Image (spheres, grey):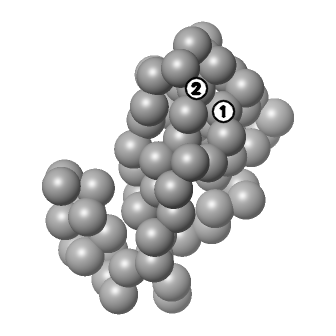
Amino acid sequence: MQWYMYVVLCFDNTLYCGITTNLEKRLKQHNGVIKGGAKYTRGRSPCKYMHKEKASSRSDALKKEYK
């Protein structure tokens, strides 16, 4: 399973960072197209990816997110 750390730019020009194994699905969730997504991004959509980075494991993705 491939993990990713990502940063999205929200409609109000704020940034949100997270991890996922499915970038396409996660962005749809953040934009309210499908159920899910972070509480932070719900009122700040549409969101778009500003940065995506592969990680070797969930642990590695979390470490990249923390940085």
Residue under label 2, please give it: 10
- Which quarter of the picture shows residue 48? top right
Q: Is 6 above or below relative to 12?
A: below
Q: Position of residue 51 (x, y in %)?
A: 51, 56
Tag of residue 47 = 1
Task: Please count the marks in the image.
Answer: 2
Tell me what residue is drawn at x 73 percent, y 59 percent.
24
Tag of residue 13 = none
Mark 2 belongs to which amino acid? Cys
- Which quarter of the picture shows residue 59? bottom left
Instruction: Please say whether residue 13 is visible from this viewpoint.
Output: yes
Tell me what residue is drawn at x 72 percent, y 26 percent.
46
Q: Nearer the viewer, residue 16 or 22?
A: 16
Is 25 positioned to the left or the right of 16 in the image? Answer: right
Q: Mark 1 and mark 2 in contact? Answer it, CB < 8 Å.
A: yes
SS class, disc 1: loop
Tell me what residue is drawn at x 19 percent, y 65 percent.
63
SS class, disc 2: loop
